[in-house]
Image (cartoon, coloured by chain):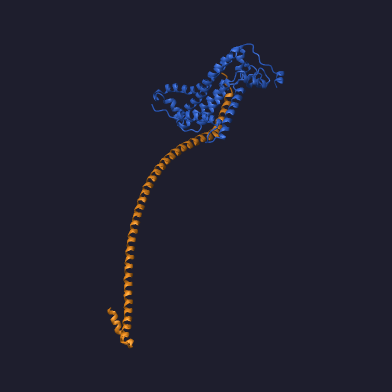
């Protein structure tokens, strides 16, 4: 065995290297390792979350689709009902209109008849007067007899 | 280059296998020579005559060089370390850091910011030094001899086959163990562990006799285990290098086996450091 001052020199070198490692080498590497570990954990968690979100979205989409189908069926139903209603209403209206037209026509006819009667009456009066004039062959005071003739005509 | 070298430099020649091995086990040692002047030892006798105040320049040079290489590499990676997808080099460094972190997590139950960098430095640095054992035994010494233009230069390429290097690691760890023991448990708690365990206060002398040697054995076993394994491995490489052309398959087989040993020894040193420091941080359960 040959112990000598090498042991001191080597101890100093050892201390220096350990100090250097402690100061400049160990912290950045371990920090990078820890950071990567964190990143990987976060990544895995994000993937899990995305999977969960995806299944949720799929469920929601299926629900929405089902709901939309139901709603559309309702709308079609309602539209059909409304169409029937409109047709019914139109029929009703048409019937009313027809009735109204018929009534109008009847009233007009009635009025025409009245007017014809009136006219006829006036003409009859004139004819009667003229006839009477001819019969009497004298000029009768038109004004005095008019009253009489009108009375006669109204009796027709 | 080779032309100019060959003028003053001749390949070293050895008269016997003993001399070959002996020369490869010598250190490039700087200290006080027998005549009182300071300089490099030129023979094993001169080296042995030097006292404590001498230094193995080859061990220091190789270990610091390897330390700078691995620390520089790690520093280079840590400067650009991102939490994104890591590239090749960062992957390797992160693998090592995660291995160390995992070991600490399973073995060390207190909170200490020093333990991670300490363990990483111990593992990587010792592994780098052990790795020099796999470089063919003559390459690095020969390179040093060529650079120094001295065919008789001693140069030991594997720092962990130097007891001084392993002892320096063990001693540093031992000092940390004592420091943290006193810091966590107080002086009384630290000394109390020797006096009142494992048999309670009525067997105090027996406790001291049992606990003090086992405590002191920690750094000694740390240093000697690493040194012994690597020294033996190096010795076998040297012996294999002596058998001529048959050395190639032998060398290959032993090198493959040795990959396991150098990794295991580096890991063991780190592991035991963590275990000892964990003991320093935890009070023993009451008996």
Identify whether A68 is placed above or below B205: below
Identify whether B135 is placed above or below A92: above
**Is B10 placed left or right of A123 in the picture?**
right
Quarter the C terminus of chain B occupies:
top left
**Residue shown at 34%/61% (left/top)?**
A94
> Where residue A153 appears, x then y in whole percent?
29, 80
**Is A49 placed left or right of B51 in the picture?**
left
Where, by quadrant of the figure, is residue A59 drawn? top left
**Residue shown at 65%/21% (left/top)?**
B143
Where, by quadrant of the figure, is residue A10 drawn? top right
How many numbered circles does the render carry? Answer: 0
> Where residue B201 appears, x then y in whole percent?
40, 25
- The residue at the far left in this view is A155
> Where residue B151 appears, x then y in whole percent?
67, 17
Task: Chain B: give its colour.
Answer: blue
Quarter the N terminus of chain B occupies:
top right
Identify whether B53 is placed above or below A89: above
Tell me if I can see residue B54 in this picture: no
**Is B273 placed left or right of B138 in the picture?**
left
> Where residue A111 appears, x then y in whole percent?
32, 72
Q: Nearer the viewer, residue B219 or A77?
A: A77
Task: Chain A: give its colour.
Answer: orange
**Is B237 placed left or right of B146 in the picture?**
left
């Amino acid at each position: 065995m040959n112990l000598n001052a090498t042991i001191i020199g080597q101890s100093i070198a050892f201390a220096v290297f350990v100090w250097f490692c402690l100061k400049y080498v160990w912290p950045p590497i371990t920090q990078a390792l820890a950071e990567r570990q964190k990143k990987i954990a976060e990544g895995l968690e994000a993937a899990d979350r995305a999977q969960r979100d995806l299944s949720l979205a799929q469920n929601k989409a299926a629900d929405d689709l089902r709901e939309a189908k139901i709603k559309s069926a309702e709308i079609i139903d309602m539209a059909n009902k409304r169409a029937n209603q409109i047709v019914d209403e139109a029929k009703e209206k048409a019937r009313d209109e027809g009735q109204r037209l018929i009534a109008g026509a009847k009233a007009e006819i009635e009025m025409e008849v009245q007017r014809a009667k009136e006219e006829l009456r006036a003409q009859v009066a004139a004819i009667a007067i003229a006839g009477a004039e001819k019969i009497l062959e004298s000029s009768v005071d038109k004004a005095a007899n008019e009253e009489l003739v009108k009375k006669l005509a109204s009796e027709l | 280059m080779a032309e100019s070298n060959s003028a003053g430099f001749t390949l070293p020649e050895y008269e016997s296998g003993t001399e070959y091995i002996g020369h490869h086990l010598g250190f490039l040692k700087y200290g006080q020579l027998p005549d009182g002047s300071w300089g490099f030892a030129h023979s094993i006798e001169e080296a042995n005559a030097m006292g404590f105040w001498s230094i193995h320049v080859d061990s220091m040079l190789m270990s610091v060089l390897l330390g700078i290489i691995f620390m520089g590499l790690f520093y280079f990676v840590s400067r650009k370390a991102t939490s994104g997808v890591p590239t090749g080099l960062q992957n390797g460094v992160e693998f090592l850091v995660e291995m160390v972190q995992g070991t600490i997590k399973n073995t060390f139950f207190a909170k200490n910011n020093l333990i991670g960098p300490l363990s990483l430095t111990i593992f990587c640095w010792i592994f780098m030094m052990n790795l020099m054992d796999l470089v063919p035994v003559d390459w690095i010494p020969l390179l040093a001899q060529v650079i120094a233009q001295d065919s008789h230069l001693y140069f030991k390429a594997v720092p962990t086959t130097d007891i001084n290097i392993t002892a320096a690691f063990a001693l540093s760890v031992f000092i940390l163990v004592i420091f943290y023991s006193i810091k966590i448990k107080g002086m009384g708690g630290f000394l109390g562990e020797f006096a009142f365990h494992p048999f309670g206060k009525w067997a105090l002398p027996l406790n001291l006799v049992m606990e003090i040697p086992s405590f002191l054995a920690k750094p000694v076993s740390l240093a000697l285990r690493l040194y012994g394994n690597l020294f033996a491995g190096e010795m076998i490489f040297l012996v294999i290098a002596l058998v001529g052309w048959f050395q190639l398959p032998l060398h290959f087989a032993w090198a493959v086996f040795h990959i396991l040993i150098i990794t295991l020894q580096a890991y063991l040193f780190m592991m035991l450091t963590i275990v000892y420091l964990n003991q320093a941080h935890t009070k023993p359960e009451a008996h």
